[in-house]
Amino acid sequence: MSRELVDSGFKQSLTDPSILVKHDSKDIIILLIWVDDMILVSSITSLLVKEKVLLPQKFRMKDLGYISRFLGIDVVVRPGRIEMTQRSYLEKVLQKFNISDCKAKITPSEAKLNFSANSPFDARKYREAVGSLIYAMTGTRPDISWIISKLAQYVQNPTEDHWTAVKHVLRYIKGTLNYTLSFTKSEMD
């Protein structure tokens, strides 16, 4: 598929081959391909409309309209703004680790982490929880980046103290399920 897209003027990103970019004078169109899903965005509506006519001539595809969900991320398009949230994904994470009914925390971690050598914790469960939080962190929750980067260092040999810190993050998530990542439109020169 990428060969045909390159032939039609798209250039594949050097940093991520699933992203293709096409420039038309000072306007831009970006195409993101993930397995059999595609997101098409443009700096100008007319360029987007033009590409939405051309692409189905080369590929079997269906236009599903404005994006609403992609890879577990809910997307809301508002005038001049795009909001992204992983609320439904994070609710499932809380359920998976039996922490849905917990009391929420107002910070992602304690101010000072103290991981003294104590009894080992189930490494598989710990990895699953940290992995779930890494996905949230890279998707829409940069607010948990620091603590998750610390906790990820212990995936091989977690202890009860590490699990307590993971539960603290999950309790923080419980209290911040409504957080969104918002992108506001800016004027182009």
Image (cartoon, rainbow, N blue to C red):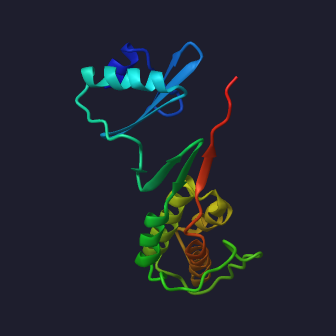
> Which residue is situated farthest in the front direction here?
79
Question: Of residues 13 and 174, which is closer to you in this image?
Answer: 174
Where does the image place residue 173, in percent across and percent down from the top left? 57, 71
Horizontally, residue 148 falls left or right of residue 112, namely left
Task: Using the image, determine if residue 67 lies above or below residue 118.
Answer: above
Residue at horizontal 69 percent and vertical 73 percent from the top: 107
What is the quadrant of the N terminus in the image?
Answer: top left
Residue at horizontal 36 percent and vertical 40 percent from the top: 65
Residue at horizontal 49 percent and vertical 65 percent from the top: 87
The quadrant in which residue 175 appears is bottom right
Question: Of residues 155 and 140, which is closer to you in this image?
Answer: 140
What is the quadrant of the C terminus in the image?
Answer: top right
Where does the image place residue 32, in percent across and percent down from the top left? 43, 35
Residue at horizontal 68 percent and vertical 62 percent from the top: 146
Task: Using the image, determine if residue 46 lies above or below residue 84.
Answer: above
Question: Of residues 91 and 52, which is closer to you in this image?
Answer: 52
The image shows a total of numbered marks equal to 0
Horizontally, residue 119 falls left or right of residue 69, namely right
Where does the image place residue 47, in percent across and percent down from the top left? 46, 21
Horizontally, residue 91 falls left or right of residue 160, namely left
